[in-house]
Image: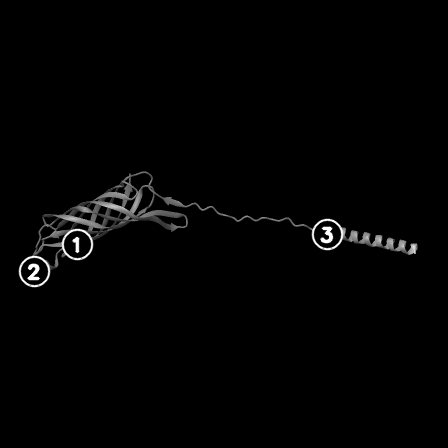
């Protein structure tokens, strides 16, 4: 009986030793791979944003087309000067000049109703930057821009007579760099005229574009 017990104990010890050795061998073959943290490759994109530094005065020139009621549409040239009082409001003075063609009535009657065909105006307007924003030209080029409303009063010299004129319209400005801007404007010049037979209020529509410089 005791002999059997001793044999059983010996066999049990051998089995436990073999199992332990097998476990050690298995553990020795296990390779623990380290955890690799991959960080995203974030590219820093630098954008150039053109903006005016601290200048308040703006001076430039423009060209365009003006439709003179009862006459013709003519090319017009002019100069403008602006003072930016705040970020929202600015004052602007304009001087434009063109030469008027023959009216329909003159073509029919084959006579010249007016002798002096110079058309010249000057005005003082108040502008309001309604929708300031940005124009994305390319991935790395952003230009500040704004849509504005403008209105004011002035004088139109036409057919040897001066006419008190109300001018109003809208415009779009793109800031190309810290001193140069590109402008596109639409204006209506309204005044009472008696150049032809009857006195009436005329509306002369003008579309122009040009460049201005800040200083």
**Label 3: which secondary element:** helix
Q: Residue at x 31, y 41 (%)?
A: 179
Q: Nearer the viewer, mark 3 or mark 2?
A: 3
Q: Residue 29 shows which numbered tag?
A: 3
Farthest residue, direction bottom: 108
Residue 83 image point, x, y percent:
25, 40
> Which of the pair 149/79 is nearer the observer?
149
Residue 177 image point, x, y percent:
34, 43
Horizontal relation, residue 129 to residue 45: left or right: left
Tell me which label, 1 or 2, sits earlier in the chain: 2
Horizontal relation, residue 42 to residue 51: left or right: right
Q: Return the residue at label 1.
A: 203
Residue 192 image point, x, y percent:
12, 52
Q: Is residue 113 above or below residue 59?
A: below
The Cα atoms of the two marked residues, 3 and 1, are separated by 95 Å
Q: Quadrant of the N terminus?
A: bottom right
Q: Quadrant of residue 87?
A: top left
> Which of the pair 95/75 is nearer the observer?
95
Q: Return the residue at label 2.
A: 109
Q: Nearer the viewer, mark 1 or mark 2?
A: 1
**Label 2: which secondary element:** helix
């Amino acid at each position: 009986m005791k002999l059997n017990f001793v044999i059983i104990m010996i066999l049990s010890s051998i089995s436990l030793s073999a199992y332990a050795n097998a476990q050690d061998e298995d553990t020795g073959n296990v390779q623990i791979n380290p955890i690799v943290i991959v960080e995203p490759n974030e590219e820093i994109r630098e954008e150039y944003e053109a903006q005016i530094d601290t200048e308040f005065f703006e001076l430039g020139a423009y060209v365009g087309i003006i439709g003179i009621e009862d006459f013709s549409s003519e090319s017009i040239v002019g100069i403008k000067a602006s003072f930016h009082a705040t970020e929202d409001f600015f004052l602007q003075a304009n001087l434009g000049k063109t030469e008027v063609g023959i009216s329909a009535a003159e073509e029919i009657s084959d006579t010249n109703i007016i002798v002096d065909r110079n058309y010249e105006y000057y005005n003082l307007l108040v502008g309001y930057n309604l929708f300031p924003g940005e124009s994305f030209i390319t991935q790395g080029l952003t230009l500040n821009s704004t849509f504005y409303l403008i209105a004011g009063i002035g004088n139109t010299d036409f057919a040897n007579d001066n006419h008190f004129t109300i001018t109003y319209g809208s415009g779009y400005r793109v800031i190309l760099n810290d001193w140069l801007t590109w402008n596109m404007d639409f204006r209506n010049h309204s005044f009472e005229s008696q150049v032809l037979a009857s006195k009436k209020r005329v509306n002369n529509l003008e579309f122009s574009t040009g460049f201005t410089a800040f200083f």
